[in-house]
């Protein structure tokens, strides 16, 4: 038994099945090479049931994103669209429509706000409560703003000198870096632009529970960015590597572009849960290596 998939990504389904390991069940006598030619897709490949089971587990993880906030109207729309499959007390429920097998959208109210994420209906009340409590801790997280010492450095293309001050959040002995605030550039407009950038990043961090910051790209939310890629069947363009790791500064930079649509992007990821979900999301989209870092 072999299952045919596109080797570039996996989104929970197969192209066809080869019950005898060599021929297409849907087109008698058709081999993998013939299927590739007919579909004009040289990336089609046949995988074993064991490999498919592994891909399926990874795809399930990609669906189970961190909780995200939804509006009150969306919460009640989901509640009323279909009878909830399972209610879990205190305005918590699993929506009736399945994403995949036992995975449904789990919705709940917390601190006067509404949240949702795909979860297994087989999770116990205790397991769901633990996840909600973890989110409550994220919402209550108010780290200190850490301001470092100023230093001088070059700026711009004309060997100008500016002053830089590092900003981060956390505790003085262990904190996560955000950015260097640039000042004394010789231009009040550019100094103001630096202050506005820092203020914008701090607002982002407070909105998303200090999970990440967005510098530029198609969408501020990295998971919505992946939704957009899949919806349009776009290809991630990798420039050297998608990630740069800075463990001593508490983050990983996620950056690249899109082949079919000019959409360079740059996110700074602080949350381990979000980082792991991004890794799983990467397996659901096509990727093209523009060049390799040596």
Image (tube, rainbow, N blue to C red):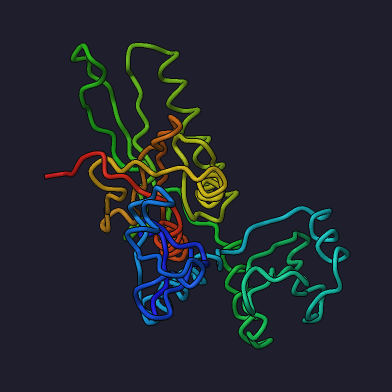
Q: Which one is nearer the viewer's eye here, 125 or 62? A: 62
In the picture, which quadrant includes the N terminus?
bottom left
Residue displayed at 52% across by 35% down: 199
Residue 232 is situated, as x and y percent measured from the top left of the image, at: 54, 42
Residue displayed at 35% across by 63% down: 32
Task: Tell me if 283 is positioned left or right of 110 in this view.
Answer: left
Residue 209 is situated, as x and y percent measured from the top left of the image, at: 55, 56
Quadrant in which residue 186 is drawn: top left
Task: Tell me if 14 is positioned left or right of 173 in this view.
Answer: right
Up-down relation of residue 123 to residue 152 (above or below): below
In the picture, which quadrant includes the C terminus?
top left
Q: How many marks?
A: 0
Up-down relation of residue 173 to residue 158 (above or below): below
Residue 101 is situated, as x and y percent measured from the top left of the image, at: 63, 77
Up-down relation of residue 71 to residue 137 (above or below): above
Q: Which one is nearer the viewer's eye here, 150 or 118? A: 118
Which residue is situated farthest in the left direction here? 294
Residue 276 is situated, as x and y percent measured from the top left of the image, at: 41, 64
Residue displayed at 77% across by 74% down: 92
Up-down relation of residue 65 to residue 254 (above or below): below
């Amino acid at each position: 038994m072999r299952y045919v998939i596109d080797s570039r990504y996996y989104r929970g389904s197969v192209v066809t099945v080869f019950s005898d390991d060599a021929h297409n069940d849907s087109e008698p006598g058709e081999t993998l090479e013939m299927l590739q030619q007919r579909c004009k897709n040289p990336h089609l490949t046949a995988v074993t049931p064991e490999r498919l089971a592994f891909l399926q587990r990874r795809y399930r993880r990609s669906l189970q994103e961190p909780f995200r906030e939804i509006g009150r109207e969306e919460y009640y729309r989901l509640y009323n669209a279909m009878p909830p499959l399972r209610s879990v007390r205190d305005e918590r429920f699993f929506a009736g429509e399945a994403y995949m097998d036992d995975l449904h959208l789990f919705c709940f109210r917390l601190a006067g706000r509404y949240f949702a994420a795909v979860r297994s209906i087989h999770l116990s009340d205790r397991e769901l409560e633990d996840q909600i409590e973890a989110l409550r801790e994220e919402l209550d997280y108010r780290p200190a703003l850490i301001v470092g010492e100023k230093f001088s450095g070059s700026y711009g293309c004309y060997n100008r000198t500016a002053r830089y001050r590092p900003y981060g959040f956390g505790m003085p002995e262990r904190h996560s870096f955000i950015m260097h605030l640039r000042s004394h550039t010789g231009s009040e407009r550019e100094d103001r632009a630096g202050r506005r950038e820092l203020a914008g990043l701090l607002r982002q961090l407070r909105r998303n529970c200090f999970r990440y910051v967005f510098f530029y790209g198609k969408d501020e939310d990295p998971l919505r960015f992946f939704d957009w890629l899949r919806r349009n069947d776009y290809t991630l363009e990798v420039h050297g590597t998608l990630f740069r790791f800075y463990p001593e500064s508490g983050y990983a930079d996620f950056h690249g572009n899109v082949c079919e649509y000019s959409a360079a992007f740059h996110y700074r990821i602080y949350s381990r849960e979000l980082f792991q979900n991004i890794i799983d999301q990467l397996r659901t989209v096509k990727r093209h290596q523009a060049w390799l870092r040596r």
